[in-house]
Structures are given as structure tokens and as C-alpha cells.
Amino acid sequence: MSPVGILVKDCDMPKVSAARIKPKNDYSINSVEHALDLLEAICDEGGEARVTNLSQRLGMNKTSVYRLLATFEKRGFVERGEDSVKYRLGLMAYEMGQKLLSRMGLLRKARPSMERLARHCNESVYFVVQRGSEVLMLDMIDGTQQVKITSLAGRRFPLAATAVGRIFQAFGPRPEVDGKKHLEVKMPPLMAADELDVVRRRGVCVDEHSFGEGVTCVAVPLLNAKGEVVAVLAILGPSYRMTRERIETDLAPELKDAGHVVSAGLGYVGHYLRRKTI
């Protein structure tokens, strides 16, 4: 069916010669591309950005940047800071992001477990997805600690550099070559195949400082009915609170249990079957 739900037959469609059909890339509108690049640049700044910096970063003249910012400001997608010379994302951008997140079935299923985990552990809990060679910190539930890590929601990090990325590598697809399975992703220097095997057996990965100096991360996979990793659940907190003893006796078991609950909701029964055979 067509996108509007109407069945369209070949005879109903006008005949278009192959020479007139443009490649998808030819339909790109430069002005829209520039506008989206500008929004992404403001988002990547993590706070507020000056016109001069945006102009230099994007290779656009200041006049064009000002005009785009004025349009976005009028529609509520950006707003000026208190000094009126810096710009940040506006409430309309936040509102659209929240609407998108609320419609994501996977995140919707994970959020109750994230909220319980944040209450029990009183640390920041993240829902992370893979985007090519990077991981995206898609959503976060914060704890009530006075000393906490600055929110990383919306930030991207290299796949190979974090415990979260190593979970994606360890539980990612391993196509068969000559009867043996091999990882599709390129191995980082400090994470060889045997180390990824250890991560798979333990079902959890821990690292320090990859998200910033003095930050510790504990991560577990979220698996679908086919046993494929579709997202990662992670706890992040200050290293002085995230001691090895606390991770082993408290945080890792709680996080793995939450991961099992979410994975079961996605149709994965492997955790249950393993418990039955022990």
C-alpha cells in the first residue's frame, strides 16, 4: 500500500522515463542542509554558542548564520542566552525530541526499569544505542546525589572507547566465515577477541575515565527475541563512589537484573533458560 493507505495500481501512475528520475541525493536542498547543520552544531556545543564560532565551524558567512538563527528563534527552536550574544537550543527543539522519545517502543519498555534502577542505586542510568561507529546516549534517568556527573544525554562517543561500545561489539553480529564466527566490527587495540569473549560470558563491562576523568561506567546489553543487542543499559557515576566492591556486590547485579527484565519484555528468553538449566 502507499504511505496514505491507498492501493495504487501501475495503470494509475503516470509513465515517467528513466532519464527523468533523479537520484535521491539530487533532491537535497542546500538551504535546508545548512539549517540542519546549524542546529546540529548548536547541539554539539553542549550549551551556548556564539555566531562567530558557528560561522567558522560550518564555513558559512555570519549573515547567513544570523538569518537562520533569527528564523529558528522565531519558531522557538533556538533562544538567546542571558548576554544576548550566544544561542542555545530552544524549548520547541526539546519538545520535538521528547515526542520522538515517547514514541520509541524500545525506550518505552526500558524506562520503568531505568527508573527503578535509578531509585535503588541512586546513580545516573543511561539508555544507549549504536549509530555507526559511535554510541549515542539517547536518554537518562538521574539519581538524587548532590555530587553527580554532568548529563551526557544526546552526546556521542566512539564505539571502541567505552564499556558501552564494547558491549555492542561483544554482543554484536558475528558472521560465519569458514565455519567460524568473527566480529564484524574492527577490534580496538585494547579490546581483543578474547577480551570480548570475557565480556560475553560475564554479561557486563566496566570502564573508568572513558566518559571523562573520574567517571566510571557499568554497562549491560539489551537483547531482542533473536538474541541481538539492540541497546545498552548503563550506570555512570563518580569513580570515588563507584568502587569495585560496590560494583561487584550491588551495581552490576542490579543492572544485570534490570537488563534481563527489559530483554524479556523484548522477547528474549535466554536468561530464563540459562537459569532453568543451572
Image (tube, helix red, strand yellow):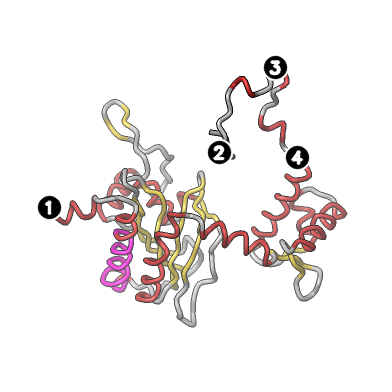
**Label 4 to label 3, Cα distance in Å?**
23 Å
The part of the chain drawn in magenta is 245-260
Q: Is residue 186 left or right of residue 252?
A: right
Say few, some or many: other residues with alpha carbon within 10 Å of mark 2 (under 14 / 14 to 19 / 20 or more): few
Instruction: Of the two numbered discs 4 and 3 on the same chain, state the one appearing first in sequence.
Output: 3
Residue type highlighted by circle 4? Ile
Residue type highlighted by circle 2? Gly
- Which residue was labeled with disc 3? 17
Residue type highlighted by circle 3? Ser
Quick check: marks 2 and 1 in contact, CB under 8 Å? no
Residue 109: x and y, percent? 40, 59
* Element assignment for label 1: helix
Instruction: Of the two numbered discs 4 and 2 on the same chain, state the one appearing first in sequence.
Output: 2
Say few, some or many: other residues with alpha carbon within 10 Å of mark 1 (under 14 / 14 to 19 / 20 or more): few
Which residue in the rendered view is the most extreme toward the left? 278
Judge whether residue 247 is colored magenta.
Answer: yes
- Which residue was labeled with disc 1? 277
Residue 64: x and y, percent? 84, 52
Residue 129: x and y, percent? 47, 52
Q: Is residue 78 left or right of residue 164?
A: right
* Element assignment for label 3: loop
Q: Could you say which disc has been placed on residue 5 in the image?
A: 2
Quarter of image, res 126? bottom left
Say few, some or many: other residues with alpha carbon within 10 Å of mark 3 (under 14 / 14 to 19 / 20 or more): few
- Which residue was labeled with disc 4? 29
Which of the two discs, 3 and 2, sits closer to the camera?
A: 2
